[in-house]
Image (cartoon, rainbow, N blue to C red):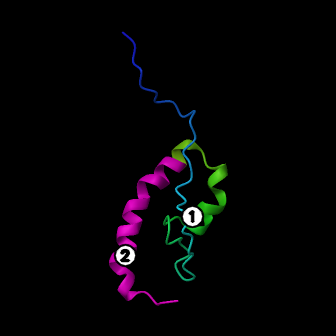
């Protein structure tokens, strides 16, 4: 019996960019995808594991940012 699932790291994880880029000048995070400016700049150089870790963190980052948005300075 063969397993048809592919757990290899051969398929690169695509950028989570939503093309709604708006970089917060204080937090230095994109308010579209919630990646940090350094993560956006280095995405093409990241290995599969680093991209997967960032992708897993993004929903929590968005939730945290939105929960604390009222306490942040507006720009």
Residue 13, placed above or below residue 42: above
- For image coordinates 46% across by 53% down, the residue present is 55
Reading the image, the residue beneath label 2 is 66
Determine the image quadrant of residue 57. Answer: bottom left
Circle number at residue 47: none
Q: Quadrant of the N terminus?
A: top left
Q: Dot 2 surroundings within 10 Å: few (below 14), some, or many (20 or more)?
A: few
Q: Residue 19 location, x and y as percent?
A: 56, 64
Q: Is residue 63 magenta?
A: yes
Reading the image, the residue beneath label 1 is 19
- For image coordinates 50% across by 64% down, the residue present is 33
View extreme (left): residue? 67
Range of magenta residues: 51-75
Q: How far is disc 1 from disc 2 in space, using C-alphas?
A: 19 Å
View extreme (front): residue? 19
| Magenta span: chief secondary structure | helix
- In-front residue for pair 32/42: 32
- For image coordinates 61% across by 62% down, the residue present is 40
- For image coordinates 35% across by 69% down, the residue present is 63
Q: Residue 13 location, x and y as percent?
A: 54, 45
Left or right of residue 43, residue 72 in this image? left
- Kindly state the secondary structure of the residue where label 2 is placed: helix
Q: Residue 50 location, x and y as percent?
A: 54, 49
Specify which label sits upstream in the sequence, 1 or 2: 1
- Kindly state the secondary structure of the residue where label 1 is placed: loop
Left or right of residue 37, residue 31 in this image? left
């Amino acid at each position: 019996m063969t397993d048809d699932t592919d757990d290899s790291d051969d398929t690169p994880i695509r950028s989570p960019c939503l093309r709604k880029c708006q970089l917060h000048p204080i937090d230095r995070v994109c308010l579209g995808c919630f990646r940090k400016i350094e993560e956006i700049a280095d995405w093409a150089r990241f290995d599969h594991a680093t991209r997967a870790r960032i992708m897993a963190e993004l929903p929590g980052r968005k939730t945290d940012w939105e929960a604390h948005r009222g306490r942040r300075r507006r720009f």
